[in-house]
Image (cartoon, grey):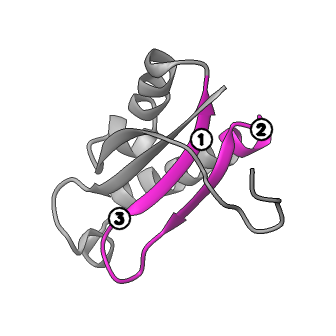
């Protein structure tokens, strides 16, 4: 498996959560469930959001570039147009609790 990172950013407004309505809230909840599913399936390396800027980082594993792109495109927040995603090949170099390679 290869590692990939995708950044998610608001698609329509940098302060979208402050102005989010019910639809956006439901989409963000679906995004969270999507990440939980990746985690349950052992594909999620880590995910989190930045509090000083409007973006989140998701690192996950996929078999190849096409599968990684399909995962990213299937994120409910991307499908709904609430967030836009930027996919990158990635490799965790150092991780707490693991010995360096």
- Front-most of 93 and 63? 93
Q: Can residue 25 be seen in this view?
A: no
Q: Dot 2 corresponds to which residue?
A: 42
Horizontally, residue 9 falls left or right of residue 64, namely: left
**Image coordinates for residue 6, horizontal then vertical, percent:** 42, 45
**Image coordinates for residue 43, horizontal then vertical, percent:** 69, 37
55 in magenta = yes
Residue 2, relative to residue 65: is it above or below?
Answer: below
| Residue found at the very far front of the displayed protein | 101
Q: Dot 3 corresponds to which residue?
A: 55
Give the mark nearest the N terminus, 3 or 1.
3
Which SS class for mark 2? loop
Provide the residue span drawn in magenta.
Answer: 37-62
Residue 68, relative to residue 89: is it above or below?
Answer: above
Q: Residue 60 carries which label?
A: 1
Give the mark nearest the N terminus, 2 or 1.
2
Image label count: 3
Q: In which quarter of the image is the N terminus?
A: top right
Crowding near pointer 3: few (<14 within 10 Å), some, many (20+)?
Answer: some
61 in magenta = yes
């Amino acid at each position: 498996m290869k590692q990939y990172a995708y950044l998610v950013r608001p698609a329509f407004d940098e302060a979208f959560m402050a102005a989010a309505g019910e639809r956006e809230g439901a989409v963000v909840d679906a995004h969270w469930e999507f990440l939980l599913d990746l985690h349950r399936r052992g594909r999620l390396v880590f995910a989190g959001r930045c509090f000083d800027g409007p973006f989140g980082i998701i690192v996950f594993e996929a078999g190849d570039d096409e599968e990684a792109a399909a995962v990213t495109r299937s994120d409910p927040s991307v499908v709904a147009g609430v967030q836009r995603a930027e996919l990158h090949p990635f490799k965790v170099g150092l991780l707490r609790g693991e010995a360096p390679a």
